[in-house]
Image (tube, rainbow, N blue to C red):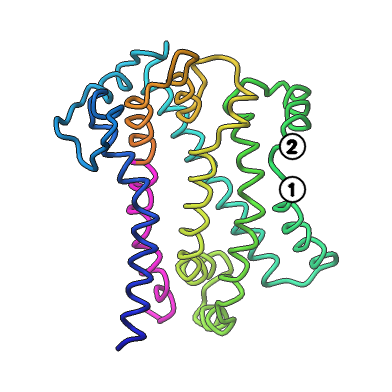
Amino acid sequence: MLRRAALNGTGLLVFVFAVFPVFWMVSTAFKPNTEIFSTTPKPFPSHPTLAHFDLVLNGGIAEVSFWEYFRNSAVLALVTVVVSSLFALLAATAVARFRFRFRTTFLVMLLVVQMVPLEALVIPLFLDLKKADMLNTLPGLAVVYIGFAVPFAIWMLRGFVAAVPRELEEAAAIDGAGPVRTFFKVMLPLVAPGLVATSIFSFITAWNEFIFAYTFLEDQDKYTLPIMLQFFFGRSGNAWGPIMAASTLLTIPVIAFFLLVQRRMVSGLTAGAVKG
């Protein structure tokens, strides 16, 4: 009982430390400026206000509407999730199920790519996009995001694909299912938890990324939501109320996406494992 109580207490303490910054962000978003800059901060706003959200949503500081930034971020995130998941699933299936030359080298290179600092790739990618005439375009930025999401997704999905027993595929083949039908009816449901995990990673990578978007995009109507936040920082001071309101709005789609797909992480564990 003491061991269980200690573990539960430690878990609760970690949870509080992890959630407190998010709680303070949401609380500050609803506080008027007098309470934000008060010398005696309070955890909850005494006089809640929606003025900061109104300023962000109506474009009170930035020249472009909040919804244009939202649209750009949503398009980039969804394209990154769909394309990277498709490429990664096919590549992971090939790596886990087939033996070919330089297979180990390919897997090692996937890890090496993850070790390269993103800041070191800004200038090379800038020059590459400029040569390809994709600079200052959302498709060009999407290619960059997909390139960073695919290696991690392949490495992660490889374990899920390798864990699927070959006997299930052989049983499906005996029942008359072809390779394509076996892939979609047997393999895909069992790998669904891995796809969900990698899609969450890909979504967060594209949704929160700032450096590449700020460097490769020039037109303000193509900016993403993380870039929008920098409009609330100024030499005369920082608008902390709108910053916290915009950060809260920026967090909601990530939570919504996780809640949308997390059910597949459980249901996909057993789906397809039993005939019929």
Asked if residue 89 lies in the magenta stretch, the reply is no
Check disc 1 and report the residue beneath it.
Answer: 116
Q: Residue furthest top?
A: 63
Callout 2 amino acid:
Leu
Q: Secondary structure at mark 2?
A: helix
Height in image: 122 above or below 2? above
Residue 68 in the image, given as x and y percentages of width and height = 41, 21
Asked if residue 273 lies in the magenta stretch, the reply is yes
Residue 188 in the image, given as x and y percentages of width and height = 49, 65
- Taking the image as shown, residue 147 lies to the left or right of residue 82, namely right
Query: Residue at point 33% right, 22% down?
Result: 56
Which image quadrant: the C terminus? bottom left
Q: In terms of sequence position, does the residue under pointer 2 or pointer 1 come before the other?
A: 1
The answer to whether marks 2 and 1 mark residues whose Cβ atoms lie closer than 8 Å is: yes
- Taking the image as shown, residue 132 lies to the left or right of residue 206, namely right
* Residues in magenta, as a range: 252-276
Front residue (pair 105, 232): 232
Give me the disc on residue 121: 2
Q: Secondary structure at mark 1?
A: loop
Estimate the spatial distance between the alpha carbons at disc 2 and disc 1, rounded to whole Å: 8 Å
Callout 1 amino acid:
Val
